[in-house]
Amino acid sequence: MIVGALVALILLVDQLVKVYIKTHFFPGETRPVFGNWFVLEYIENQGMAFGTTFGNKMWHKLALSIFRVVAIGAIAYYWFKQAKEGAKREFLIAIGLILAGATGNLIDSMFYDFVFPYNACDGFNYLKGSGIYTHCGFFTIETRHTGFLLGNVVDMFKFQAIWPDWVPLLGGNEVFPAIWNVADASISIGVIMVFFRQKTYFKDSKPSNRSWYSGLKRKNEKQQDTKTEQ
């Protein structure tokens, strides 16, 4: 119950933040949150988490979205199965975070093209090689496909911290250049929890196997003792 409420809360917060950004920011607009090192910047991405992309054809985007649907279904099934089997609450929270984040970004792709006005000339709708040509002022550009499962994902959080110049290889570069959203953060936290805490989540499996083996061993020893006495 608590884990389900947490998942629902993350989904709600993710969508509320995205709707606020879509309705109160201009594309590319930046507003400080904590000084200049953490800001809100309205951008949209056509691909996966943290602005990564996946091809320029309609089937590329559809394949990505369908994969998300299948993955979400599999995660949800596994989540409910683990809950019924009495898995640790922390583990259910970790899986729930991944589920909430994946679902949050999928909602963008499914519905935002229908809910909000679409301006093909916004920079984040440019997609070279799409074959869809749009007149934008004095220029004609190729823009993305639109429709169900084809929409962009809204991103807004950005760290603007810079590595000190003395840091090898990284000096002068941004600490974390990607722009992300609540759903991305939820997925990342869930994956990190599973990765670093897996021994805690699954530690009961090995003792149970050892107990089964020990029981079988004792049974064999008793049978041998009986034969010896006879």
Image (cartoon, helix red, strand yellow):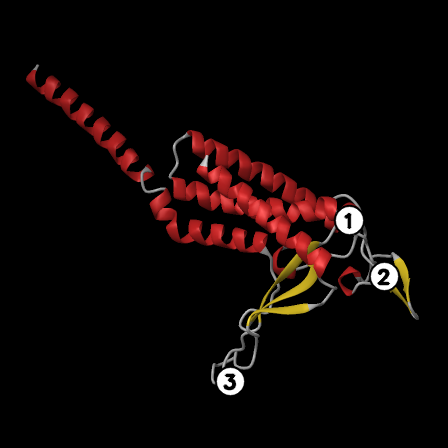
Looking at the image, is 153 positioned above or below residue 79?
A: below
Question: Which mark is on residue 165?
Answer: 3
Dot 1: what SS? Answer: helix
Dot 3: what SS? Answer: loop
Front: mark 1 or 3: 1
Is disc 1 in contact with disc 3, using a CB cutoff of under 8 Å? no
Is disc 3 in contact with disc 2, using a CB cutoff of under 8 Å? no
Residue at image point 26% right, 35% down: 210
Name the amino acid type tagged 3. Answer: Asp
C-alpha gap between disc 3 and disc 2: 39 Å
Question: Which mark is on residue 113?
Answer: 1
Mark 2 or mark 1: name the one nearer the start of the chain.
Answer: 1
- Percent position of residue 44, x then y: 70, 59
Q: Nearer the viewer, residue 78 or 104?
A: 104
- Percent position of residue 40, x then y: 62, 65
Residue at image point 77% right, 50% down: 116
Name the amino acid type tagged 2. Answer: Glu
- Percent position of residue 202, x then y: 36, 42
